[in-house]
Amino acid sequence: MKDLYKDWCDEVEVDAFPNCLVCGKEAGYNAKTEADLWCYLCEECFLKYGQGLGPTDGQILVLKSRKKSV
């Protein structure tokens, strides 16, 4: 049987951090909530409403590294 989560990563690169869907602060997570909905969450809301990290629960948002032209 094929491993569906073999290439899963716990971080997702973004160009800019979106706003938390709950409170409007800068989000640091894309996560599933207690209501079984996925949304961007800040750390405080993630700790309060998030289901955790993992292939079926959520990822940490990180900024894409920008290459400097020489």
Image (tube, rainbow, N blue to C red):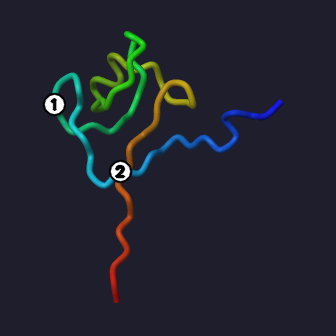
Q: Assign a secondary structure to mark 2.
A: strand
Front residue of 59/44: it is: 59
Residue 13, given in percent of the width and then of the height, sits at: 41, 51
Residue 15, given in percent of the width and then of the height, sits at: 31, 55
Image quarter (top left, top right, bottom left or bottom right) of the C terminus? bottom left
Quick one: label 2, few (<14), some, or many (20+) residues within 10 Å?
Answer: few
At horizontal 27% and vertical 32% (from top left) the residue drawn is: 42
Res 4 → quadrant: top right
Residue of label 1: 24
Quick one: label 1, few (<14), some, or many (20+) residues within 10 Å?
Answer: few
The Cα atoms of the two marked residues, 2 and 1, are separated by 17 Å
* Residue type of the residue flagged with mark 2: Val
Q: Is residue 51 above or below residue 4?
A: above
Q: Which residue is most to the bottom?
A: 70
Q: Is residue 7 above or below residue 54?
A: below
Q: Assign a secondary structure to mark 1.
A: loop
Q: Which mark is residue 45?
A: none
Residue 39, given in percent of the width and then of the height, sits at: 33, 27
Image quarter (top left, top right, bottom left or bottom right) of the N terminus? top right
At horizontal 27% and vertical 26% (from top left) the residue drawn is: 44
At horizontal 33% and vertical 79% (from top left) the residue drawn is: 68
Q: Which residue is most to the front?
A: 1
- Whichever of labels 2 and 1 marks the residue nearer the N terminus, that label is 2
Q: Which residue is most to the right?
A: 1
* Residue type of the residue flagged with mark 1: Gly
Residue of label 2: 14
Front residue of 20/1: it is: 1
